[in-house]
Amino acid sequence: MNENTMIHFAPLQGYTDAIYRQAHARIFGGIETYYSPFVRIERGEIRRRDVRDIEPDNNRDLHLIPQLIAPDADKLEQIMSLFIEKEYKEVDINLGCPFPMLAKRHNGAGMLPYLEEVKTLLTAAIGKYPDIRFSVKLRLGWDDAEECLALLPLFNELPLSHIILHPRLGKQQYKGEVDLSGFEAFYEGCNKPLLYNGDLHTTEDIRSITARFPRLAGVVIGRGLLANPALAVEYRQGKPLSSDEMARKVSQLHSEVFGKYEELLQGGETQLLMKMKSFWEYLLPEGDRKAKKIIHKTSRLANYQAAVSNLLGSL
């Protein structure tokens, strides 16, 4: 059991943007690396919000690795030009996104059955950008856990900085159990630093995984940290935050994120409410159910703020 295991914050589209990352790093901390939600080409261009999200000025005082998703080298190079302009030296390539609309176009986990496509994409990236440290995030496969094993000789051969593996199939999305036997088969043959990602919700979950796989280079947590933003620091210090401290820090996190969105968004109360409702989608799953129901259903900012106060007061 290694209490010094590095904890990294996985990206979730619509949740872990730059505003959230900066607030989390300042108020909770305990994170080695934050990954940006993947940057992609949409209608021939990079979305403006993706450009804004990785701006170095919007990610001060934290270690950010931008992530990209692309089905071919041309789109990858278009995104890489942005990352290089922003002076990033580390980039993560997403081969794990399970969403069918992207996967059917051979993005993310949808590319995993096609070894030659993966090889073309990664060798083009590494060959064209030798000064960039590339990592890869993937799943066991799209249809079959053997897909990641077929790719393993390629990964072992390439100069990847690390690999992040989520032990589900793409077609599962986030349903069903993680396949730890499938992860173990990849772990045993992998000669790169390997990080585990998937269904880590408690400090005991982290300890269990690191005990079973002692050579892990770290763990990558997404939904578990959104539910409990103190998870990393609780693991590091070996004890949970007190109820009072947790309530105080969540209140700070909410206030900072709310204030930044209030400055940024131009759509008035309705847009602000819609954005802040997503803030609570994963957070504090055991919190007061009545208050959370009001947060998600109200169309009035005053009702929202009263419900937030009640929720925090119930901790």
Image (cartoon, grey):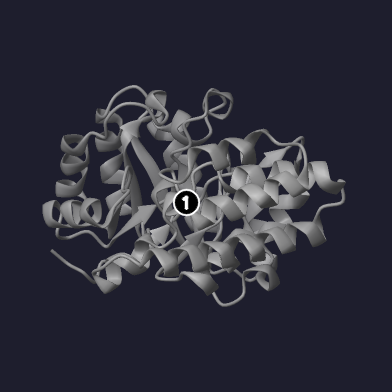
Q: Quadrant of the N terminus?
A: bottom left
The outermost residue toward the bottom is 61
In the depicted view, which residue is nearer to us: 235 or 162? 235
**In the picture shown, does residue 99 fall above or below 193?**
above
Residue 16 x, y percent position in the rendering: 56, 53
Image quadrant in which the C terminus is located: bottom left
**In this orientation, which residue lies closer to the viewer: 268 or 206?**
268
**Residue at x 44%, y 64% (from the top left corner):** 246
Image location (x, y in percent) of residue 292: 55, 40
Instruction: Write down the residue under mark 1.
Output: 226
Q: Secondary structure at mark 1?
A: helix
Residue 183 spot, x, y in % from top left: 22, 41
- Asked whether, in this view, residue 193 is left or right of residue 262, the answer is left
Q: Residue at x 19, y 48 (%)?
A: 187
**Could you tell me if residue 253 is visible in this image?**
yes
Most foreground residue, 108 or 236? 236
Please, what is the three-letter code of the amino acid marked with disc 1? Leu
Q: Residue at x 65, y 64 (%)?
A: 255
In the image, taking residue 236 as reference, residue 56 lies left or right, namely right
Position of residue 110 in the picture relative to residue 258 (left or right): left
At horizontal 87% and vertical 51% (from top left) the residue drawn is: 266
**Residue 130 visible in the displayed image:** no
